[in-house]
Image: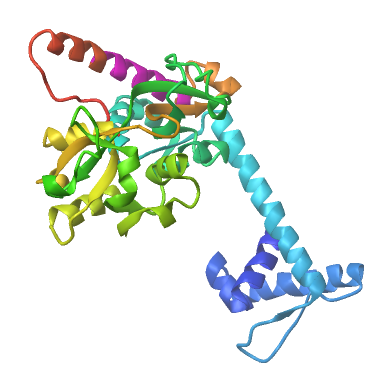
């Protein structure tokens, strides 16, 4: 395994010196291993793996050497993946992620279990996830638990606390803890006269049909492009008046708040509520309008926690189960507090805003 690692390092760095620096070893040690492999594997294959050039020049890998270097990469990657899988299965590591607007929710739950993770030697790593990649991060086994938002059809049934959403095929292999579900609205700095109601009899909100004529601030990836594709097809950009393309909602809010341009930005209902209630400082000065789905299929945003359906999830002492149950307890407390508050007076929602 060490020889394979050396071969791959030389192949990727180009020289024995570069490989030595990368691996933190002496160049003479790297060169000795390289000479041994070149002699033994070269004799076995009928062609040397590489040929030396002048001092300081990149070594030349033969076709056999290139094939074996690629094989070494696959072998090493396979072992790393296998070791990582074994560690996660045995509860020695836990990889979790969240979208920006669910990070606080996740952190509050992690704080409750992190001392136990430390005592038991659980290696916890966290990652930022874009909404459009929530399920992909689980599917690829990059993460074990993700908090965020996904798109579902309006006809999909509500999720049980620890069950998959049965009406949505895409979620069949996952457990879903649903926190909220909602539609969409527009965050805008446009004057009222620029946002005619497109003939809506109730005079409230903007219809989906009106979106192509509005100057829009649109994300390049994430959840919102998927929404637009659902309404206008894969070539939606050709049909829209795109005033600006952004990488994050935060950037879009600051852009509109600055009044550098006048336009509107499609956001989820939860984020729209946070703007209205003043909980997003970066969106100060913007107002929101409800979006009425008057064409195409109705789409909803499901906000919650997601994990793969795996045998270790049935172990209550497994790290992913401990964190999952803490998230469930926290959500139950928030729901109870909101029910009590609703009987008294309206209060800002404390659940994730996505």
Tell which of 239 and 125 is nearer to you.
Answer: 239
Q: Is residue 211 magenta?
A: no
Tell which of 189 and 267 is nearer to you.
Answer: 189
Q: Is residue 286 above or below residue 181?
A: below
Which residue is painted at 41% across and 44% down in the image?
228
Q: Indicate left or right for 300 with 332 as reference.
A: right
Q: Is residue 106 above or below residue 220?
A: above
Q: Is residue 323 magenta?
A: yes
Which residue is painted at 30% across and 19% down in the image?
331
Tell which of 241 and 281 is nearer to you.
Answer: 241
* Position in image of residue 315 (x %, y %): 53, 17
Q: Indicate left or right for 110 with 73 as reference.
A: left
Residue 49: quadrant of the picture: bottom right
Q: Quadrant of the C terminus?
A: top left
What kind of secondary structure does the magenta stretch mostly adopt? Answer: helix
Residue 243: quadrant of the picture: bottom left
Q: Is residue 243 above or below residue 176?
A: below
Tell which of 40 and 183 is nearer to you.
Answer: 183
Query: What sort of colour scheme is used for the picture?
Result: rainbow
What is the tally of numbered marks visible in this picture? 0
Magenta residue span: 320-333
* Position in image of residue 211 (x %, y %): 31, 45
Examine the rendering and report whether any part of residue 10 can be seen. yes
Which residue is painted at 36% across and 18% down in the image?
328
Which residue is painted at 58% across and 72% down in the image?
20
* Position in image of residue 119 (x %, y %): 39, 28
Q: Quadrant of the N terminus?
A: bottom right
């Amino acid at each position: 395994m060490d020889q394979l690692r050396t071969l791959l390092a030389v192949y990727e760095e180009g020289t024995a010196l570069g490989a030595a620096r990368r691996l933190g070893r002496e160049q003479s040690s790297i060169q000795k291993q390289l000479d041994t492999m070149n002699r033994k594997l070269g004799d076995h294959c009928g062609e040397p793996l590489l040929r030396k050039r002048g001092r300081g020049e990149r070594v030349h890998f033969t076709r056999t050497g290139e094939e074996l270097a690629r094989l070494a990469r696959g072998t090493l990657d396979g072992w790393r993946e296998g070791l990582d899988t074994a560690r996660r299965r045995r509860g020695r590591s836990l990889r979790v992620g969240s979208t920006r607007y669910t990070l606080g929710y996740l952190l509050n739950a992690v704080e409750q279990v992190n001392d136990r993770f430390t005592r038991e030697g659980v290696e916890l790593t966290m990652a930022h996830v874009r909404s459009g990649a929530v399920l992909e991060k689980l599917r690829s086994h990059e993460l074990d638990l993700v908090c965020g938002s996904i798109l579902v059809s309006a006809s999909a049934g509500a999720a049980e606390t620890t069950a998959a959403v049965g009406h949505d095929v895409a979620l069949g292999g996952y457990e879903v803890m649903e926190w909220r579900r909602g539609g969409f609205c527009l965050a805008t700095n446009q004057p009222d006269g620029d946002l005619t109601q497109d003939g809506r009899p109730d005079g409230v909100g903007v219809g989906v049909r009106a979106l192509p004529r509005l100057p829009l601030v649109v994300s390049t990836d994430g959840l919102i492009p998927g929404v637009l594709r659902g309404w206008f097809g894969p070539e939606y950009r050709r049909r829209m008046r795109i005033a600006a393309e952004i990488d994050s909602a935060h950037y879009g809010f600051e852009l509109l708040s600055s009044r550098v341009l006048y336009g509107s930005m499609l956001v989820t209902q939860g984020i729209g509520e946070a703007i209205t209630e003043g909980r997003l400082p970066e969106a100060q000065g913007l107002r929101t309008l409800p979006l009425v789905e008057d064409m195409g299929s109705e789409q909803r945003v499901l906000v919650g926690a997601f994990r793969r359906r795996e045998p270790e999830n049935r172990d209550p002492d497994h790290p992913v189960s401990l964190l999952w149950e803490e998230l469930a307890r926290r959500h139950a407390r928030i729901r109870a507090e909101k029910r009590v508050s609703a009987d008294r007076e309206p209060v800002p929602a404390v659940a994730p805003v996505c």
